[in-house]
Structure formats: C-alpha cells, structure tokens
Image (cartoon, rainbow, N blue to C red):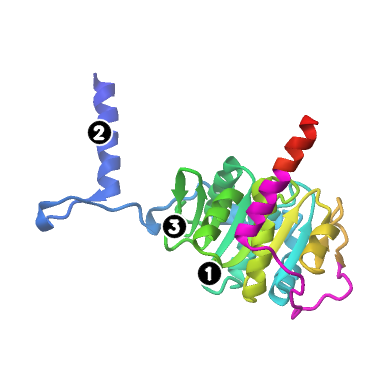
C-alpha cells in the first residue's frame, strides 16, 4: 500500500511539473515542458566528442561549401559515417536554411523517429520543438521546428498542399537507394520545384547509390564520393556543372507524374498476366 502511495505521489509531482493552473476564467491551461526543462541523457562534452569522432566530420566545411554554391548535391558514403544525423546539423549551424526548415526524408517511419530523437539529444532540445519528425498518424513538430525528419510519403502529401514547399529551405533525400513509389515520384516533384525555386537546396545521400544516374537526373549535380576508408577526400565535379545552370528538360507535373505511373503499372500487370 505504501508503495502504491509512493507511485501516486510521483505521478502527482510529474503532473505538477508539466502544468500550471491559471485562475483566469476558472480554467486550467496546460503548459508543456519549456526548453529550460530539457535534460539531455548525454553531456555536451560527450556529444561533441561523439560528433567529432564520426568519419564525416573532417569534411564538414567541404559539404557546407558545396551546398552553399550549388542547388543540388549528391553525396555517397558508407553506412555509419554519420551522414543521416550530421549533415542537417552542419547546414543548420552554418545558417544555410536562412530561417526555413531543413527537411530530411526517410523511407521508413522508425528511421525518421529514431533519427529525430538522436538529433534532438545532440542539439539539446525537447523533441518536437527545434527538432521534430512527421510520420503517418504522428506529427511531432511545431511552428518552431527547424530540423524535420519525415517519410517520403509525408513530404509528398505536403507537396500536394503546397506545390512549392515554400517553408522548406533544404531537403535531404536520405537512403535514396531504397527506392519506392513515393521516392521515385518525389524525385520528379522536387526537380519541378527546383526549376521554379532557385533558393531551394536539394541533397541526395545514400550508402549504395548509383550517383552518376542521380547526378545526371538533376543535370550534372556535383558529387561528393567517399571511399570505405575515409582517409582521402575525393571530390568529383561532372562536366558542365554550374551553380547557375538552368533546367532545360521538361519536368512532368505532379498530376502528370501520377498518371504516367498508373499507366505504367497497368501495363506491367497486363504483361505479367500474359
């Protein structure tokens, strides 16, 4: 019985911590944890040491410089290099977003959630404030969110409502090799948006991607290619690359892309039946 009362008292203490009672109009107004209430499970020195030990850290300035100079960049590196958690932070710390949102797409919901939690710990903020995520049936973000992890499908949904994705400054397509219907359509949509928004930065990252094909798709975007050892930098610029290049090819619209995909799907199904 005493143990039950102890648990109950602990619960009451937590509730008192999470809410403040306002006497105005006799109503109780809930107030979430503030930024000052956040306690990271890691010390700042420990986080700094972990970030600087990642293979991608020596190339931080190089990545920032390329993203600032070019609209589209393709980056390939092995799994475990830290690209999924660090690139968004590098760009945020360098002010590349310019007040907009840095979006990072993931093919799976679990990845979007876990990456958002890790980055929020490294940034030192409550999940859902400065760093958040958005997946189906769970939007853990707010108007103050600057770094947002979301699935490919959720970004497509946002593009359907806002065809220019105006509140995004940078969009990172992570794990691009895990191609799906949403990923393929998203590439077409973003290419069309980039044609109309020269200020939008697009970064394609993966561990096992055919970078040449993706670079050509975005009209010879620069490639950052890293070896398995990460001992020597190897930066490759494709011929004809220019920071002011224009998209001369016709990019299908959102509606056209979906229609063409549906036609191709029906054709494939008929071929299989035959």
- Judged left or right of residue 74, residue 148 is left
**Marks 1, 3: nearer the viewer:** 1
Front-lying residue, 180 or 97? 180
- Judged left or right of residue 102, residue 218 is right
Whichever of callouts 2 and 1 sits on the residue coming sooner in the sequence is 2
Front-lying residue, 238 or 218? 218
Which residue is labeled 1 in the image? 166
Whichever of callouts 3 and 2 sits on the residue coming sooner in the sequence is 2
The quadrant the C terminus occupies is top right
Disc sitting over residue 83 in the figure: none
Q: Is residue 139 above or below residue 245?
A: above
Residue 71: where, in percent of width, then height?
Answer: 70, 72
User: What residue is shown at x 29% (from left), y 35% (from top)?
Assistant: 10
Local secondary structure at mark 1: loop
Instruction: Determine crowd level at label 1: few under 14, some 14-19, many 20+ residues with C-alpha closer than 10 A.
Output: some
Q: Is residue 255 magenta?
A: yes
User: What residue is shown at x 78% (from left), y 33% (from top)?
Assistant: 272
User: What residue is shown at x 63% (from left), y 74% (from top)?
Assistant: 196
Distance between the alpha carbons at the discs numbered 2 and 1 = 47 Å
Residue 111: where, in percent of width, then height?
Answer: 61, 44
Magenta residues, as a range? 236-265
Local secondary structure at mark 2: helix
Distance between the alpha carbons at the discs numbered 1 and 3 = 20 Å
Residue 84 makes an appearance in the image: no
Q: Is residue 256 above or below residue 247?
A: above
Residue that protrudes farthest toward the bottom in the picture? 244
Which residue is labeled 2 in the image? 9
**Marks 2, 1: nearer the viewer:** 1
Which residue is labeled 3 in the image? 129
Q: Are marks 2 and 1 in contact (CB under 8 Å)?
A: no
Whichever of callouts 1 and 3 sits on the residue coming sooner in the sequence is 3
């Amino acid at each position: 019985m005493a143990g039950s009362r102890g648990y109950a008292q602990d619960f009451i203490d937590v509730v008192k911590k999470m809410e403040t009672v306002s006497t105005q109009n006799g109503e109780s107004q809930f107030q979430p944890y503030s930024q000052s209430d956040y306690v990271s499970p890691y010390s700042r020195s420990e986080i700094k040491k972990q970030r600087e030990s990642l293979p991608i850290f020596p190339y931080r300035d190089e990545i920032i410089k390329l993203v600032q100079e070019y609209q589209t960049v393709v980056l390939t590196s092995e799994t475990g290099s830290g690209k999924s958690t660090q690139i968004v932070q590098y760009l945020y710390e360098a002010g590349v977003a310019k007040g907009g949102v840095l979006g990072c797409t993931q093919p799976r919901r679990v990845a979007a959630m876990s990456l958002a939690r890790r980055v929020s710990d490294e940034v030192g903020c409550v999940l859902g404030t400065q760093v958040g995520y958005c997946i189906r049936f769970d939007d853990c973000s707010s108007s103050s969110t600057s770094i947002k992890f979301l699935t490919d499908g959720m970004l497509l949904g946002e593009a359907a409502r806002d065809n220019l994705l105006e509140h995004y400054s940078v969009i990172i397509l992570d794990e691009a090799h895990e191609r799906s219907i949403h990923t393929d359509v998203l590439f077409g949509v973003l290419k069309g948006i980039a044609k109309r928004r020269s200020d939008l930065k697009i970064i394609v990252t993966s561990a096992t991607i055919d970078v040449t094909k993706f670079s050509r798709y975005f009209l010879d975007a620069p490639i950052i290619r890293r070896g398995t050892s990460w001992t020597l930098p190897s930066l490759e610029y494709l011929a004809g690359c220019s920071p002011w290049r224009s998209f001369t090819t016709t990019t299908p619209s959102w509606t056209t892309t979906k229609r063409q995909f549906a036609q191709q799907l029906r054709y494939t199904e008929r071929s299989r039946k035959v």
